[in-house]
Image: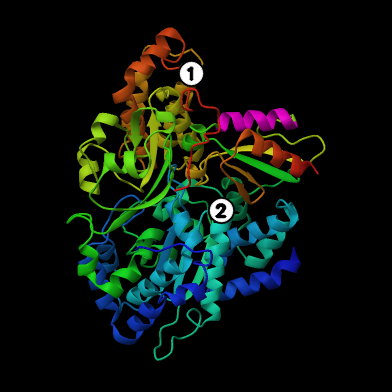
Amino acid sequence: MTFPVTADSHTLAAYRARGGYATFEKVVRDMRPEQVTQEVAASGLLGHGGAAFPAGRKWGVIKLNDDQPHYLCSNADEGEPGTFKDRWILENAPHLLVEGMLIAAYALQVRHAFIYIRGEFDLPYRRIAGAVEEAYAAGLLGAPITGSAFVCDMIVYRGAGSYVCGEASGLLTSIEGKKPYPRNRPPRLTVRGLYQRPTVVNNVETLANITGIVRDGAAAFRAVGTAKSPGTQLISISGHVRKPGVYEVEYGYPFAKFLNEDCGGIVGGGKLKCVIPGGISTKVLTAAEIEPLTLDHASVAGAGSGLGSGGMIVIAEGTCMVRLLQVLARFYHHESCGQCTPCREGMGWLHKIVDRIVAGLGEPDDIDRLIAISEANDGTTICGMGDAAGYATVGILAKYRDEFEHWIVHGRSKCGGRLEPQGAEWAIPETVDG
Amino acid sequence: MKELHAEFDALRQRFPPQSESSLVLPCLRRIQEERGFVADNDIDELVAYLGVPRMQIEEVLSYYTQLRRAPIGRWHLQACRNVACSMRGAEGVVAQIGERLGIAPGETSEDGRFTLSTVECLGSCGTAPVVVVNETYHENLTPEKLDALIERLRR
């Protein structure tokens, strides 16, 4: 979905100048809704929010003539630590999302579409809200499209600080004006979602791909990427890497080449210790493990982790994994919504135990306790947050157990207790914007 | 905040019919923008305006971290200390702010000008470390840039 950024690329005028909204207008004029869904299904487009569920299959569940309202929600809650790609779309290409959503709304016969954006986002909010207002003023929203009966309203809904809102059912509960407790499935959200009606929740990047797929056809989309992961993925890379930023990568691109060449390798000429490949809820991979991998879902999953949301965190040699887990445990503890006991209590226990180890008060059984608590979460909570926290914890403990044992036995870190790279001040001057 | 009702009415037009409940969060956000926090009488008025249970509004207010029931400092410094920011010096950022302003996370300075909070990932991992002041992101911070920022806010 190549989209060159210019100073005005977020405006309607600039977007129109590149052919923007021509696809949507053509769709409304020439295509039936089910044809659009067929094209998206044929493209093999995978969800870009982390779970990689095929978008066309999700859309296919919606029954067009069932005499009830359908809803579409764009998940712009982007809160998975390490992930900042949707922010890039919202800031630089908001009309790409609005047009994708309009096409999706037409395909799914949606009258009201929502963009749920996290409450902290400031510029991304102003850009997407501005784009929606421009679309209203241009008659693309809120009024029937010329020559058709299709009308769609679009609402930019701001969150107020909660990680769980990124979980699709929690997001819908939040739009309903409540605390965002996730819901048990079944029923699936495509059967009973927002206000108990059939609802499609798609990630921002997923929806931003729709216009290109419908314009150029499924075959053109499939010409890029791998058979199982067609197309491209936005990777947001951060941590101890020379050139952090957002990169669009063709699925199947070599992992190590991406890190060492495109992103410039490790800051300060250091060595790679490990990578969190797709947001902190995916398992950490060591430098040796990433060597043979390619950047697509099958390859990274084959190594026991996942490409997730494309939020890649690069960790240099010399970084203390106990301190790293302490940060993760604090985050999960803070963000647990409190609905399910194993997560509400378990996250607190994980946090307390890691804190205790760092304070030099760890007990010999603490590592096994951390593993037992993590495993007790797996499959026992309504949403996946508890599971994910457990995977991340077990992943670090399995590969860096010695660092935990060292801190418990000796009362101090095996590698200086640092999260910043060795010898660096807390500003890293050689960083270049990606 | 009855003066906001016209704005709320306009907002309501875009929502599906009978979705008053959905307006709780946008209304609370807007009230807080005006007043700096949500007061008891704001809740009373919102209960009357939207016709939703008071309990629902109280739950939303107590759940979401950005909403508050009491005023804070003029400048709200929110320092991220999640993974990517920690890997690029978030601890130093929090320590430096604390030292310059004499407040710990969660505290407000005596003159009521500054409140310091530590927050979780703000999506600035590639431009870490970050401090958000009220709504505005200040990214790629260095000790010098942070000092200059604090100086500007002090004026």
Write down the chain letter for disc 2: A
| Residue A76, image x, y percentages | 46, 57
Q: Is A26 drawn above or below residue A200 in the view shown?
A: below
- What is the three-letter code of the residue carrying label 1? Val
Q: Is residue B138 left or right of residue B73?
A: left
CA gap, disc 2 and disc 1: 32 Å
In the depicted structure, whether residue A190 falls above or below residue B105? below
- Is residue A216 among the parts visible in the rendering? yes
**Could you tell me which quadrant the C terminus of chain B lies in?**
top right
Q: Are marks 2 and 1 on the same chain?
A: yes
* Viewer-proximal residue among A255 and A108: A255
Residue range (magenta): B90-101
Q: Looking at the image, is mark 2 or mark 1 earlier in the sequence?
A: 2
Residue identified by numbered label 1: A358
- On the image, the x and y values in percent for residue A197 come to 39, 67
Q: Is residue A98 left or right of residue A396?
A: right
Q: Quadrant of residue A347?
A: top left
**Residue beneath disc 2:** A119
- Residue visible at 40% across and 70% down in the picture: A101
**Residue A420 magenta-drawn?**
no
x and y percentages locating residue A273 in the rendered image:
34, 28
| Disc 2 secondary structure class | loop
Q: Label 1, secondary structure: give it.
A: helix
A56 w.r.t. A78: above or below: below
- Horizontally, residue A265 falls left or right of residue B113, namely left
